[in-house]
Image: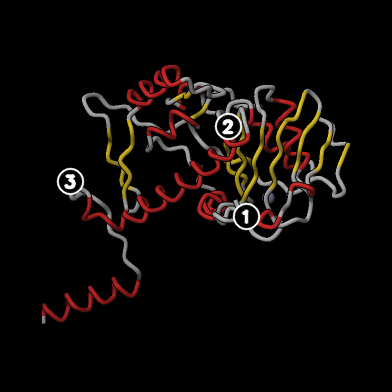
Amino acid sequence: MYAREYTDANAGNISVRLGADRLLMTPKNVCKGFMTPDMMCITDLDGRKLQGDLDPSTEMLMHLEVYRHRADVQAVVHAHPPTATGFAVAGIPLDRAVLAEVLTTLGSIPIAEYATPSTSELPEAVRKYIKAHDGMLLANHGALTVGPDLFAAYYKMETIEHFAKISLVARMLGRENLITRQEVDRLQGLRGMYGIKAPAPICADPASLGTDADTKEAADCQVVQAPSASGTRLVPDVIDARTASMRPDGEGEIRLTYRELSALIEDAIRNLR
Ligand SMILES: [Zn+2]
């Protein structure tokens, strides 16, 4: 994680189940780039330290919360990968149907509400999404992933950061073609074929959940933004109106600054004279 710049200084933390009531956890105040095996802590599921010279991670409560709600989870990874965290800071969830592989593995990546790091607020924010998601952004903080083993959880962190980078590039280019709801359903069917154990089904139609999808106590499906369309599997979706010229129908909106608009008007007046 440190080599890939998912963490800086002492940030980020990892834990893994050692048995029914024991966790191996990274310690507090240690840079993950310089961590050695002897620094690791062993705790029980209530966070009591059983073994280790150093104290467990300051985000231990968030890890414990995940294990309490997900018996299937064997490992938890938390980091601050810069591009994904940028989305978390901008308040933009990674929930658009754009990459087939992300849809089959993670589904959608929602943003857990802002919470003060290291406090009991953070596990509360995570609780809303952890039942149905293996990965989420933490508002103005970072990302959290879980998995059936340590590397599965870590690879989901890589997938989220990679997805965030691709989304950022597509949005800078001014458009994203979205995978249709029908295709999303087909991809969901492939989960079984590939043996992918997602914690919850994708609900590609947020409208069917009613208007309170965001305020529900705990999400029980993965909401993916996927348009409905027949006869086509990708639907163009213009994000930035400034790239109107890239729209095939030429109907895009153009935004100008006040200075640009004034210059255009002055030019037009000059031409009239
Ligand atoms: Zn953090």
Tag 1 secondary structure: loop
Question: Badge 2, how many Cα within 10 Å: few under 14, some, many 20+?
Answer: many
The spot of residue 188 in percent (x, y) is: 42, 22
Q: Which amino acid does label 2 sit on?
A: Asp
Tag 3 secondary structure: loop
Quadrant for residue 137, please give it. top right
Asked if disc 2 and disc 3 are in contact, CB closer than 8 Å, the reply is no
Upstream in the sequence, badge 3 or badge 1?
1
For image coordinates 37% across by 53% down, the residue present is 169
Asked if disc 2 and disc 1 are in contact, CB closer than 8 Å, the reply is no
C-alpha distance separating marks 3 and 1 = 44 Å
> 122 above or below 224?
below
Residue at the disc numbered 1: 7
C-alpha distance separating marks 2 and 3 = 39 Å
Q: Nearer the viewer, residue 14 or 189?
A: 14
Identify the disc placed on residue 249: 3
Residue at the disc numbered 2: 134
Q: Which amino acid does label 1 sit on?
A: Thr
Q: Nearer the viewer, mark 2 or mark 3?
A: 2
Does the residue tagged 2 have its C-beta within 8 Å of any atom of ligand 1?
A: no
Q: How is the image coloured?
A: secondary structure
For image coordinates 65% across by 27% down, the residue present is 73
Question: Badge 1, how many Cα within 10 Å: few under 14, some, many 20+?
Answer: many
The spot of residue 66 in percent (x, y) is: 70, 31
